[in-house]
Image: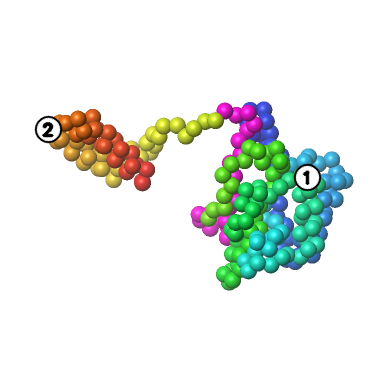
Amino acid sequence: IPWHGKLTMTVLGVYAPAESMEENEAFWNEMCDLWMTLDLPVPDWIGGDTNLGDEPIDRLPHRADAPGAVAAYNKFKRMLELKDGWRTIHPDTKAYTYTSTNGKSMSRIDKICVSPNLMKNCRHWSIDEVSGKLTDHKMVSVVVTAPGSPYIGGGRYTIPLFILKDKEFLEFVVREGEKLEESLTEERSETINIQTRFKTFKDEVRDFARKR
């Protein structure tokens, strides 16, 4: 897929079987065979539902998944020289992406595995809730920067244009603006004057806009 400038990124999406560990193992073995026998591109990352907790810490209650399935999954990662990015950054953290329907068990089965070179440019690995009803899994995410890209900060905050049609926001601005106008006749000092009052007004408008 196009990435940055002339750079491209090869991404492999996976959804491993959940019916049994035997099918899961067969899936990863088949993936290994495909990449060994066909002229397929080596992905920069793979992401998706592995339906596998490859370490006991990835399950709650803690338990090890079937050794054969874990071995096949790890073989595929080694063959493509990929590593589990979130676990690399959080080696001892317990976090889970799926909770069983009865609520008695949790697992970290959704993963993003990346190449060592790409790992150097990955930031902010995270596991978060997903709004809406698109999935019953949590979302794994990461920010990937292009090699050699200059650092670009967040920039100066600006109020989005759509909020100018927000009735409650406009009423707040008018109300606070009238208060500011009334204060112009009040006594001034080095710490309380039109400049400081205007700054307070702008800060309050900005903060109110952010809450909308």
The one of 151 and 37 positioned closer to us in this rendering:
151
Locate residue 70 relative to residue 185 in the image: left or right: right
The quarter of the rendered structure image containing the N terminus is top right
Kind of residue indicated by mark 2: Glu
Q: Does the magenta stretch include residue 145?
A: yes
The residue range painted magenta reads 130-150
For label 2, the residue is: 187
Looking at the rendered image, the disc whose residue lies closer to the viewer, 1 or 2, is: 2
| Residue drawn at x 85%, y 50% as measured from the top left | 33
The image quadrant that residue 186 belongs to is top left
Counting labels gives: 2
Give how far across and how far down residue 88 sits, in percent: 66, 49
Kind of residue indicated by mark 1: Leu
For label 1, the residue is: 80
Q: How crowded is mark 1: few (under 14 residues within 10 Å), some or many (20 or more)?
A: some
Locate residue 178 relative to residue 9 in the image: left or right: left
| Residue drawn at x 72%, y 65% as measured from the top left | 64
Q: Residues within 10 Å of mark 2 (few under 14, many from 20)?
A: few
Give how far across and how far down residue 29 sits, in percent: 82, 55
Give how far across and how far down residue 11 sits, in percent: 70, 42
In the orientation shown, which residue stands out farthest toward the right? 37
Mark 2 falls on what kind of element? loop
The image quadrant that residue 150 belongs to is top right
Q: Is residue 61 magenta?
A: no
| Residue drawn at x 37%, y 43% as measured from the top left | 210
Coloring basis for residues: rainbow
Give how far across and how far down residue 187 sits, in percent: 12, 32
